Amino acid sequence: MGPPGAGKGTQAERLVKKFGMKHLSSGDIFRAEKASDSELGRKLASYMDAGQLVPDEVVVEMMAKAVTQAGDNIMLDGFPRTVAQAESLDEQLAEAGSPLDAVVVMTANDDIIIKRITGRRTCPACNRGYHVTFMPPKTEGYCEDCDDVELTQRSDDCEETVRQRLEAYRAQTEAVIGYYRDRNLLKIIDVDGNLDAEIVSGEVIQALASFEA
Ligand code: AMP
């Protein structure tokens, strides 16, 4: 859990490699549907491009399917984002007999978030991520691993939309963290997402490993 740009995707990638988990990113799932230009994809785009949350009934249906398909040992990233989504996920996981084990909560300052997100670029061919300042490719604007492939920017990564997304986070998603903190059996791992990704993953890996032991 954490605001956009806190480093959820980066950390999820690192953790799934370390622990052999499956990475389920609601944003990635929605972007794939959006790219297919289906009717559902166009509906998703109308919310995503405005920096607003997709309505719960759509999210719950799509993510319930994805969770069922993935089975066990999942790293959820970007879902749930509302208390209603969290309740519905709890019900589904209780029925499956595999409730959540831990929640990683990441914080980050707004100025860092804006810098990180607006500079973010991706290779559309291999999905490798870059940052114009913090992790630039050898040749500006082009992927290092793919011949002649120009990097792209997510349509919702401009400053105006990022501010909308931050607002949606504060209005609708922050309450989910409280919802999880109120549950005694759930391990909550708090990390400072302003720090270097390497330091953050070290902390999370240590906390999760002690939990596994
Ligand atoms: P993300 O890649 O996690 O930053 O998500 C990109 C966009 O997808 C968000 O700004 C929302 O419009 C939408 N989205 C992703 N996950 C959810 C969710 N759990 N609930 C509602 N909207 C979501």
Image: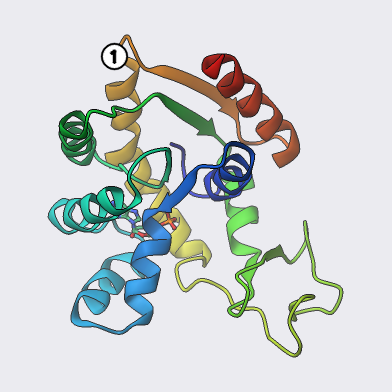
| Amino acid type for the residue under numbered disc 1 | Asp
Residue 119 is left or right of residue 12, and the answer is: right
Q: Is residue 103 above or below residue 186?
A: below
Residue 70 is left or right of residue 136, and the answer is: left
Q: Is residue 120 above or below residue 1?
A: below
The image quadrant where one finds the N terminus is top left
Taking depth in this image into account, of 21 and 121 the one nearest to the observer is: 21
Residue 13 is left or right of residue 202, and the answer is: left
Residue 43's x, y, as percent?
A: 21, 73
Residue 103's x, y, as percent?
A: 43, 27
Q: Please give the name of the residue rendered at 33% of the width and 76% of the height, measured from the top-left corner.
A: 34
Residue 183's x, y, as percent?
A: 29, 14
Residue 205 is left or right of residue 180, and the answer is: right
Q: Is residue 168 above or below residue 46?
A: above
Farthest residue, direction right: 138
The image quadrant where one finds the C terminus is top right
Farthest residue, direction top: 184
- The residue pinned by badge 1 equals 182
Task: Identify the secondary structure beneath mark 1.
Answer: loop
Residue 27's x, y, as percent?
A: 40, 59
Q: Please give the name of the residue rendered at 56% of the width and 43% of the height, measured from the top-left corner.
A: 16
Q: Please give the name of the residue rendered at 33% of the width and 82% of the height, measured from the top-left corner.
A: 36
